[in-house]
Image: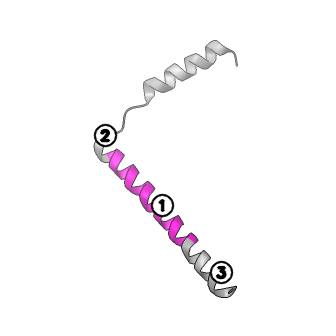
Amino acid sequence: MDISAFFKNVKRLLKLTKKPGKEELLLSIRISIIGIAIIGFIAFIIRLIFALLFR
């Protein structure tokens, strides 16, 4: 793929995208925070189990 075709594809992609609305942005942030919290909780439980098993 040459450079001009790449820029045509980028231009076409940017025309299709849109800025998220406030509700969509807040939903994305909420989902991200929940996911990070779940992963942190799982890591905490695993660390707690290993701490109790290998005293």
Residue in the foreground of this view, choosing between 34 and 47: 47
Q: CA distance from mark 2 to mark 1?
A: 21 Å
The residue drawn where x is 50% and y is 26% is 13
The quarter of the picture where the N terminus appears is top right
> Label 1 sits on what residue type?
Gly
| Of the pair 39 and 9, the residue shown nearer to us | 39
Residue 15: x, y in percent? 44, 23
Q: Nearer the viewer, mark 2 or mark 1?
A: 1
Residue that carries the numbered disc 1 in the rendered image:
35
Foreground mark, 3 or 2? 3
| Residue 14 spot, x, y in % from top left | 47, 25
Residue found farthest to the top: 4
In the image, which disc is placed on residue 4? none
Q: Are marks 3 and 1 in contact (CB under 8 Å)?
A: no
Q: Is residue 43 above or below residue 30?
A: below
Predominant SS along the magenta part:
helix
Question: What secondary structure is found at the residue carrying circle 3?
Answer: helix
Query: Can you say which quadrant of the picture contains the C terminus?
Result: bottom right
Q: Quick check: is 51 in the magenta stretch?
A: no
Pointer 3: what residue?
50
Tell me which corner region of the image, top left, top right, bottom left or bottom right, holds residue 3: top right
**Residue type at numbered disc 3:** Phe
Tell me the number on the disc at residue 21.
2
Cα gap from disc 3 to disc 2, whole angstroms: 44 Å
The span picked out in magenta is 24-43
For the residue labelled by badge 1, is the local secondary structure a helix, a strand or a loop? Answer: helix
- The structure residue drawn at horizontal position 52% and vertical position 66%, both measured from the top left corner, is 40
Q: Earlier in the sequence, mark 3 or mark 2?
A: 2
Question: Is 31 a magenta residue?
Answer: yes
